[in-house]
Image (spheres, grey):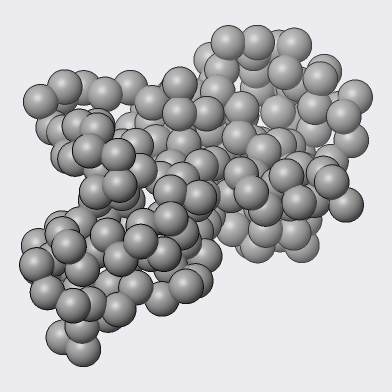
Amino acid sequence: MNDWIMVKNKTNLRKCLLTGESLPRDLLIRFVVDPEGVVVPDVEGKLPGRGLWMRAEAGMIRAACAKDVFSRAARCKVRAPADLADQAELMLRRRCLDLIGLAKRAGELVGGYQQVRAHLRAEDAGVLLAARDGAVDGRAKVRALAPTAPLVDLFDGTELGRAVGRDRLVHAVVDKGRLAERICRETGRLSGLAREDRARRLAG
């Protein structure tokens, strides 16, 4: 999913603490040290303090915690919780679902299988949303109407439904625009954090 990220300002780079790579902020998670000396995620990039940037991949964040990379970067002893990657994923998941809810309230999201199919015949898609526990054949039929649009399948039907005020939602489309771009950007970051959990579900 990170391939979908459109980096408009190529000079807006930050260095990953673990790998030393200079990467666009859209591929990274910012962390800061709180007043108690604990590393906390700052997925919105708004908390005060020096930013400590890590690639948005759960395995890398866990490796950084194990190797005490955050202390070296902060130039003092700090505590990086073992579940730091999980904290970041939870915060980013909430942020993504909040954006989906915002798209619904803004009138830029259409939900429901038939409604989405009808909408795609008349409008271009900014991003398709498909519940990960939805039927594969239904997803394929929707996908065929917008084969080049980004497809997000990181949430189950209950999560998507709650985001838009329903019990359950399997198919949705967000119109092209800034909200669709933000959803693509944030779910791109989330995909790296959720990849291990997805692999565990498939293995099980």
Query: Is 179 situated left or right of 195 in this image?
Result: left
- Look at 50% across and 50% down and name the residue there: 59
Could you say which is closer to the camera, residue 21 or residue 34? Answer: 21
Relative to residue 46, is residue 128 depicted above or below?
above
* Rendered location of residue 192, percent (x, y): 51, 42
- Look at 24% across and 48% down and name the residue there: 17
- Look at 76% across and 51% down and name the residue there: 200
Relative to residue 68, is residue 121 depicted above or below?
above
Could you say which is closer to the camera, residue 136 or residue 88? Answer: 88
Query: Is 14 situated left or right of 173 in this image?
Result: left
Q: Is residue 74 among what the camera can see?
A: yes
Could you say which is closer to the camera, residue 149 or residue 68? Answer: 68
| Residue occupying the far bottom of the picture | 36
* Rendered location of residue 77, percent (x, y): 18, 77
Relative to residue 29, is residue 181 depicted above or below?
above
The image quarter containing residue 148 is: top right
State how many labels appear: 0
The image quarter containing residue 165 is: bottom right
The image quarter containing residue 130 is: top right
| Residue occupying the far front of the picture | 67
Q: Is residue 25 among what the camera can see?
A: no
* Rendered location of residue 6, percent (x, y): 33, 22
Could you say which is closer to the camera, residue 89 or residue 143? Answer: 89
- Look at 80% across and 27% down and name the residue there: 139
Relative to residue 102, is residue 20 depicted above or below?
above
